[in-house]
Image (cartoon, rainbow, N blue to C red):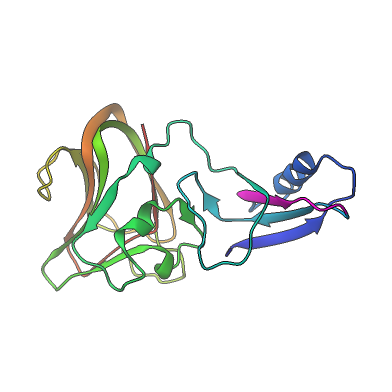
Amino acid sequence: MDCSVGHVTLAPNTPAVHACASVCLATKSCQLYCLNFRPSGNECFIFSALVTQNWKGDPDSSVTFDVCYSTWYHSGDITHLVSSTAASSILQHSTTGDKAVDGFSCRQVPHQCFHSYVRSGAKSWWRADLGIPRSVSRLLVFTRNDGNQAAHFSNIIITLGNSTLTGQNPVFASLDSGVTGQMMDFIVTTPMIGRYLEFITSPQLFLVICEVKIIS
């Protein structure tokens, strides 16, 4: 797994979960801690990755853990209820729309993000299908954070409703300026209800969304 911060072997006969949690609390960038239980001393692994219950794990990784605990938890998180995603386009096969809701965010580099590319004059868009109309009050959006200063998340309109036609649903939030390397927090005073959550840009070449957390 990327975003490894550190690894310690805990003293035998210590409460492993509590001891590893203490290491996490003492580590500023810790967002996830995992354990492997061993007779000779339990192993505690610290990560800065943001992980939710929606993450299915890395099928290409040979690294496994006995148990993991994430600090990135919200009782109203409904991102795991997204049944499918769609988009105007993708830049390459590894930057598909589902990357924006896979429950894993680490350094927000392009290959871990949804990344669209359209011809000049066209609008990029990304859509999540929540299966049925659901109440949404807040969105957390992680943008690209790999040192590229180009604003690939800018001039955005976010809509939520029951139409599958791009731009035809009520506006949930909007963003005029461009941002990169930030977590954006969109909150509405009164929760909105809809099945299709959509991010639409003004005419521009790129749209990059590294992770979206949908909160009811």
Left or right: 106, with 191 as reference point: right
> Picture quarter containing residue 130?
top left
Q: Position of residue 173 (x, y in %)?
A: 25, 41
Q: Position of residue 126 (x, y in %)?
A: 24, 55
Q: How many marks?
A: 0
Magenta span includes 202:
no
Q: Quadrant of the C terminus?
A: top left
Front residue of 195/6: it is 195
Instruction: Give the residues drawn in magenta, as a range.
Output: 31-39
134 vs 12: above or below? above
Extreme-top residue of the structure = 190
> Picture quarter containing residue 76?
top left
Q: Quadrant of the N terminus?
A: bottom right
94 vs 16: above or below? below
Residue found at x 70% / y 48%: 24
Front residue of 41/121: it is 41
Q: Position of residue 163 (x, y in %)?
A: 12, 41
101 vs 135: above or below? below
Q: Position of residue 125 (x, y in %)?
A: 20, 57
> Picture quarter containing residue 202?
bottom left
24 vs 87: above or below? above
Residue found at x 71% / y 56%: 45
Residue found at x 13% / y 46%: 164
